[in-house]
Image (cartoon, rainbow, N blue to C red):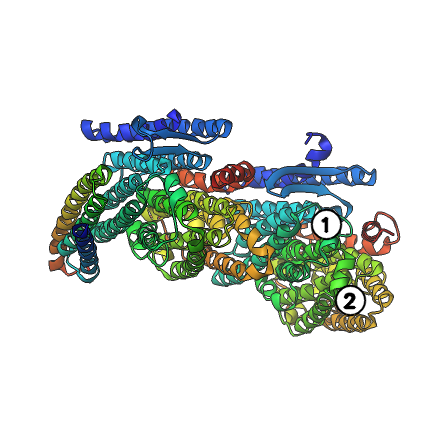
């Protein structure tokens, strides 16, 4: 029981940490990592909630698996976009035309 | 229900086939949208004849399975989504300026259509998370079709959208942890006003408001919507921001306990008024045409937020009719405005509002479409925007104690009139008109006019529409 | 609803100008003949249909067209005696102004757009006159704003755009107030059909604050178009529009739409008794009286002919509001007769101003010296209309002022008599010098031979016949309306008929 609460608290903490990072950091890669931290926090909360009632709740675990798939694809997409953005900026920078 | 599912599966199947077979021709999407529109129309007819229908997906009953529900509102939204997609697809295929021919626009727009349809049909918190995430990813992918310049706003939109989804997901987890169900109706029966419910609703609301660009979480919208290709801007403004709004509305009007709704309603309504004024002011000040139209979306969503807030505060379900009328009228008007603005800025060769000098001469049809659609945003009779405003005003004006809210609506009306006529007045300036860079495209301009006329036609069709919308909200 | 001819006639009257207008938009610039043909077909058709409706109403037939629109508020077009008064005025003057505009805009650019919007304006005016309830009235009132804006900015110059922006600010603001007022009343009772004596009496006790606020909103919204005192600022500015627009729209259709709306609200929505019970007529009366004096004083200071006429409109239109606010049957007859009389006289004056400007380039008052020798017919028309404005018997203006004065005495508001006398003196003070200059002063320079002129000789050829004929036509009508006031088919006689129904006499 207390183990579940511990993981619950840790998950919330991770989520908050991720949010903090997302709001404070500017670099796209760091912000993507912050988002992933938020995601991990959420999944941890869900897993903790699933085991809280004594037996493991299969629904929540199924949700976590679905969520992981979504998160992985979203991260991949974000990374690809960040790379393209970075490449575009570095091409633009010498001309000094592009404003950030 | 089969018909509604067909309306969802047609664009989905088309999009997947196009991805697999590497087809990039617009004809397929146009055909799929047309088919989807037909199915949605028949589904609407079916709902009117037989009442609300539900479907347990794969035969799994709630609480384990996922439930689809086809209410008359959902059917109207399905029709609206398919119609908008059809129109925009024809535009994207035929306009010289759409830059969508033979690109990934086509499969993506099919996916967008399918995820929206799934969102309208779902009544399950987690399934909504999946559709929201899909919607966000597809929208971002469509924004970057306009080239590297759109990467920065698209990346910002993507990160905010992912964060918002996780906010929402954490809320869903908390609710499931508390009640052990994800189905909307089961949750509505079980919900109580305790601490974890409050927390969950707060998290979900922040996530949804961010995704719907509701004031004060709207800052990503103008850059993202205005940097997208014209056809995509139209879809984003008309449809995508309405998805999260739908969930927000269902969540608060069904699940939230009554003693929470009153205070939340006040906040929503105040945010709505501020959105009207702040969005209107920003639209009045911006030098860029598409940014003006995008800020007008922020302002117009204020009406929806105001209707939602007052509906929660006074527990008057009639106000949800006003909310959905605003959504429909705004969607049609925005399609028209974005298409007209896109045509004009491509033909006149400048993104600035000031380049529209003399546009009544050089591009009369597009300018007329812009003005007519703007008339609906202002709420001039007999347009869809007018009917929506009328329905919203009725309960506000009935009791003197509510009159301050009506004053807010009046100010919002004046603000929208100011930014619409800022553009329209400029277009009559014949002294030094901006000459078109190359030949205007008459067909695309007429296409832009079509939804503007439809939104005025909506007014004459308002009685059955109000009836259907009120059945869904009751 | 059965589709019999009595149901479809009101719709037909609106469509008879709307459809030609929409067709005209699609024409190319050089398709002059087709455009003129469409215009004239529309005018003559409308004239015929209005004549048919007049005949029908006189025989007691009911004309009513309705389609569902809002919950509790249908879209209703109906022909009653009051709406016919305004419809007939608009239609007859549309005929005259169309001919005038064809002559005036000969070889000007963008004529398709001009005549398209011009027809839309007339359709909106007629729709507003035929509107059977407040929702329908609101709809056409806003459409009138939208359709007139392109005409104000028609010239596309910076002044025109500036005037257009001012015009929009005022009229859209007014429209928003009117919307609020109509929506407020609608939230209480829905929007039933206009009826003599109003429909708000049952709510008098329970909903007093709502009724007062709604009245303020409605009058505020209508007062913009009727150019009531603090809301009149758009009218003098809008004079940059081409002369036919100033003549028909700003002197007649738009300002009359406001005044007509006030008549409807007072008589057919609120009713005389509730207005008096709420004490709403007194502020309205004060406002109207102040506007009458203010407009005349401002007119006295003007140096441009069109500006002077504009301020004179501000003053003269408020006679209608004044007559309504006096709340007595005799004053009401005066007010309704003035609705027509002022329209005929003012349109004549604007035609004359347009003739002077087009033929000789005369815009300012001091350039008018001796213009009567060069353009005697136009000047005669001008003199007749100006004397009517002053209220010299037996012109039409005298008739309406006479009834207004009698009405003031009847209701015991003898102070209003002073206002009427003072305003008459002021009218004389700014119109008589013009008449004197025109006929008796010697011109400062010889008139240009044919440089800007459409034609050269004084008399029938003093200007383009399409400019002269409408001027003489409306001047004659204004004179006849005064001389034949005692007969049953004059504007006065028809007003008497309306008021007998309203006051149940």
> Can residue C123 be seen in this snapshot?
yes
Distance between the Cα atoms at labels 2 and 1? Answer: 23 Å
Secondary element at tag 1: helix
Residue C410 horizontal/vertical position (percent): 87, 65
In which quadrant of the rendered view does residue B445 lie? top left
**Residue B183 as seen in the image, left or right of residue C381:** left
Q: Chain of mark 1?
A: C
Residue lying at 68% horizontally and 54% vertically, measured from the top left: C261
Q: Residues within 10 Å of mark 2 (few under 14, many from 20)?
A: many
| Front of the two marks 2 and 1 | 1
In which quadrant of the rendered view does residue C211 lie? bottom right
Which mark is on residue C227?
Answer: none
Count of numbered marks: 2
- C168, C16: nearer the viewer: C168
**Where, quadrant-wise, is the C terminus of chain A in this rendering?**
bottom left
Q: Which residue is mark 2?
A: C390
Contact between labelled residues 1 and 2, with CB atoms less than 8 Å apart: no
Q: Which residue is mark 1?
A: C86
Q: Chain of mark 2?
A: C
Q: Is residue B287 above or below residue B211?
A: below
> Can residue C395 be seen in this snapshot?
no
**Residue A54 as seen in the image, left or right of residue B175:** left
Secondary element at tag 2: helix
Residue C386 horizontal/vertical position (percent): 75, 64
Residue lying at 46% horizontally and 47% vertically, measured from the top left: B323
- C209, B430: nearer the viewer: C209
Q: Which of pointers 2 and 1 lies earlier in the amino acid sequence? A: 1
């Amino acid at each position: 029981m207390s183990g579940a609460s511990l993981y619950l608290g840790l998950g919330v903490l991770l989520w908050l940490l991720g949010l903090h990072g997302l709001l404070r950091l500017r670099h796209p890669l760091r912000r993507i990592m912050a988002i992933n931290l938020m995601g991990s926090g959420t999944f941890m909360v869900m897993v903790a909630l699933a085991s809280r009632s004594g037996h493991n709740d299969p629904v929540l675990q199924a949700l976590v698996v679905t969520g992981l798939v979504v998160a992985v694809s979203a991260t991949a997409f974000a990374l690809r976009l960040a790379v393209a953005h970075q490449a575009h900026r570095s091409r633009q920078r010498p001309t000094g035309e592009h404003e950030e | 229900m089969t018909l509604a599912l067909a309306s969802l599966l047609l664009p989905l199947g088309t999009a997947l086939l196009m991805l697999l077979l590497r087809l990039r021709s617009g004809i397929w999407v146009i055909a799929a949208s047309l088919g989807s529109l037909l199915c949605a129309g028949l589904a609407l007819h079916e709902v009117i004849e037989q009442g609300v229908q539900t479907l347990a997906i794969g035969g799994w009953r709630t609480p384990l399975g996922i439930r689809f529900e086809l209410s008359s509102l959902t059917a109207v939204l399905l029709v609206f989504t398919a119609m908008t997609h059809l129109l925009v697809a024809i535009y994207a295929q035929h306009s010289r300026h759409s830059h969508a021919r033979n690109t990934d626009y086509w499969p993506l727009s099919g996916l967008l259509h399918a995820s929206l349809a799934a969102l309208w049909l779902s009544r399950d918190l987690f399934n909504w998370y999946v559709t929201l995430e899909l919607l966000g990813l597809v929208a971002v992918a469509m924004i970057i079709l306009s080239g590297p310049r759109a990467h920065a706003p698209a990346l910002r939109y993507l990160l905010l959208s992912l964060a918002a989804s996780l906010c929402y997901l954490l809320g869903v987890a908390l609710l499931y942890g508390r009640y052990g169900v994800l189905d909307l109706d089961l949750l509505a029966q079980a919900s109580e006003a305790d601490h974890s419910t409050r927390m969950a609703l707060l998290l979900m609301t922040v996530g949804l408001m961010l995704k719907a660009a509701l004031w004060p979480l709207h800052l990503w919208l103008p850059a993202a919507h205005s940097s997208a290709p014209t056809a995509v801007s139209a879809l984003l403004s008309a449809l995508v921001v309405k998805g999260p709004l739908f969930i927000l509305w269902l969540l608060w009007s069904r699940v939230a306990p009554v003693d929470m709704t009153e205070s939340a309603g006040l906040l929503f309504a105040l945010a709505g008024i501020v959105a009207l004024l702040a969005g209107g002011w920003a639209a009045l000040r911006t030098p860029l045409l598409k940014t003006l139209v995008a800020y007008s979306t922020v302002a117009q969503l204020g009406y929806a937020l105001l209707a939602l807030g007052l509906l929660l505060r006074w527990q008057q379900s009639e106000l949800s009719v006003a909310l959905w009328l605003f959504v429909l009228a705004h969607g049609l008007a925005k399609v028209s405005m974005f298409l007209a603005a896109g045509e004009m800025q491509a033909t006149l060769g400048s993104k600035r509002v000031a380049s529209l000098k003399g546009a009544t001469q050089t591009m009369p049809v597009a300018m007329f479409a812009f003005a007519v659609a703007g008339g609906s945003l202002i709420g001039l009779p007999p347009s869809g925007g007018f009917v929506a405003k009328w329905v919203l005003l009725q309960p506000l004006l009935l009791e003197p104690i509510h009159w301050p809210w009506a004053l807010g609506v009046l100010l919002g009306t004046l603000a929208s009139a100011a930014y619409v006529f800022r553009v329209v007045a400029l277009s009559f300036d014949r002294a030094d008109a901006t000459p078109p860079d190359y030949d205007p495209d008459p067909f695309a301009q007429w296409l832009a006019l079509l939804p503007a006329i439809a939104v005025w036609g909506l007014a004459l069709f308002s009685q059955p529409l109000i009836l259907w919308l009120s059945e869904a909200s009751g | 609803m059965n589709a019999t001819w009595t149901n479809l006639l009101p719709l037909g009257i609106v469509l008879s100008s709307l459809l030609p207008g929409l067709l005209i938009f699609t024409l190319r610039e050089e398709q002059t003949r087709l455009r003129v043909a469409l215009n004239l077909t529309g005018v003559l058709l409308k004239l015929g249909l209005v004549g048919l409706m007049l005949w029908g109403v006189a025989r007691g037939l009911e004309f009513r067209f309705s389609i569902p629109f809002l919950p509790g508020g249908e879209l209703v077009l109906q022909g009653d005696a009051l709406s016919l008064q305004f419809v007939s005025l608009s239609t007859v003057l549309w005929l005259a102004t169309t001919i005038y505009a064809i002559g005036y805009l000969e070889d000007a650019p963008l004529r398709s757009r001009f005549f398209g919007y011009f027809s839309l304006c007339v359709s909106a005016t007629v729709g507003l006159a035929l509107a059977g309830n407040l929702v329908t009235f609101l709809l056409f009132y806003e459409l009138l704003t939208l359709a007139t804006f392109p005409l104000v900015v028609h010239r596309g110059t910076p002044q025109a755009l500036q005037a257009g922006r001012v015009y929009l600010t005022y009229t859209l603001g007014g429209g928003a107030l009117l919307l609020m007022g109509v929506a407020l009343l609608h939230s209480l009772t829905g929007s039933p059909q206009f009826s003599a004596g109003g429909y708000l009496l049952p709510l008098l006790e329970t909903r007093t604050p709502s009724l007062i606020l709604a009245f303020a909103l409605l009058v505020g919204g209508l007062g913009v178009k009727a150019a009531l005192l603090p809301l009149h600022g758009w009218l003098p500015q809008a004079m940059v529009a081409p002369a036919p627009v100033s003549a028909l729209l700003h002197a007649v259709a738009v300002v009359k739409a406001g005044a007509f709306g006030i008549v409807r609200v007072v008589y057919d929505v609120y009713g005389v008794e509730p207005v008096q019970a709420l004490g709403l007529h007194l502020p309205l009366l004060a406002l109207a009286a102040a506007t009458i004096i203010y407009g005349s004083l401002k007119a006295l200071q003007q140096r441009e002919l069109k500006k002077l006429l504009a301020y004179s409109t501000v003053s003269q239109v408020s006679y209608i509001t004044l007559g309504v606010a006096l709340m007595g049957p005799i004053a009401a007859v005066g007010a309704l007769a003035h609705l027509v009389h002022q329209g005929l006289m003012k349109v004549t004056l604007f035609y004359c101003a347009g003739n002077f400007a087009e033929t000789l380039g005369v815009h300012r008052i001091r350039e008018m010296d001796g213009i009567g020798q060069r353009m005697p017919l136009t000047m005669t028309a001008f003199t007749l209309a100006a004397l009517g404005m002053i209220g010299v018997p037996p012109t039409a203006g005298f008739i309406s002022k006479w009834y207004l004065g009698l009405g003031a005495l009847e209701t015991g508001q003898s102070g209003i008599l002073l206002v009427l006398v003072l305003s008459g003196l002021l009218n004389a003070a700014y119109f008589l010098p013009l008449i004197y200059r025109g006929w008796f002063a010697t011109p400062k320079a010889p008139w240009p031979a044919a440089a800007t002129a459409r034609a050269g000789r004084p008399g029938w050829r003093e200007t383009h016949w399409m400019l002269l004929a409408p001027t003489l036509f409306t001047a004659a009508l204004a004179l006849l309306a005064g001389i034949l006031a005692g007969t049953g088919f004059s504007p006065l006689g028809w007003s008497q008929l309306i008021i007998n129904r309203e006051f149940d006499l």
